[in-house]
Image (cartoon, helix red, strand yellow):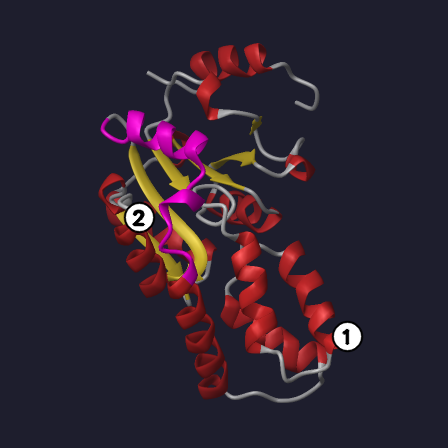
Amino acid sequence: MIGRTTSSLRRQFKSNYKLIKTIFWDFDGVLMDSMSVRNEGFIEVLKSYPTEQVGELMQYHLANGGLSRYVKFRYFFEQILNERITDEEVNRLAQEFSEIMLTKLKDPSLLISDAIDFVKSYHKQHAMHVVSGSDQKELREICAAVGIDQFFITIGGSPTPKTQLVKDVLNQYGYSNQNCVLIGDSVNDFDAAQINGVRFFGYNNVKLKGLGEDYIEKFSAFDIR
């Protein structure tokens, strides 16, 4: 798969993937260019803690883009600071983080037009669902604010893990695994696809080339009708 040309990707997508009926979308880094804002959010919420330890969290955060903030805050305290933290405290930090996100991410200019144009073109022919590590309530509010909520049957997020989100949608709608693909930009997205037996296409992260069935360079090159 590494080194395929755009034209060969397009031919394979059209021939081998024409049975795809359902698309699971990651959000951050796939539908919205929001990662730098997310980075700022963690730094702001944890500004009272030592810079070195916050830096360790940022490395973990960047390596695990598909994990929720709940997991990351708990990791920060339990694995980096070696301190216990209650669910209530994790929720408080997550809420503070969400308030920052809602002030910064309701911005249509942050949408990734390459992916969004594809969604707009094919959402009537293909069932589309968002499965994200971002907070579900926050995510739904952002999608509504930037006018893309109408394109997705469901918009799911944390604290439910992404693996469970995919499983729940598969069960609720009775989708066949072989007719589904998850498109994401992190290894956690790949893991969620693998665990649920659905296909995986990497996007917007060249480190994912070679994982899953394909790597999407540009959605504008594809026609899946």
Residue 41 relative to residue 105: left or right: right
Q: Nearer the viewer, residue 13 or 195?
A: 13
Residue 74 relative to residue 24: left or right: right
What residue sits 48% from the left and 17% below the top? 221
Q: Amino acid at mark 1?
A: Glu
What residue sits 73% from the left and 69% below the top? 56
Marker disc for residue 181: none
What residue sits 44% from the left and 69% below the top? 100
Residue 114 relative to residue 46: left or right: left
Residue at numbered disc 1: 52
Q: SS of the residue at dot 2?
A: loop
Residue at numbered disc 2: 146
Q: Nearer the viewer, residue 56 or 79?
A: 56
Residue 59: image x %, image y %? 71, 61
Residue 183: image x %, image y %? 48, 38
Residue 75: image x %, image y %? 63, 74
| Region rendered in magenta | 104-124
Q: Amino acid at mark 2?
A: Val
Q: Is residue 214 above or below residue 104?
A: above
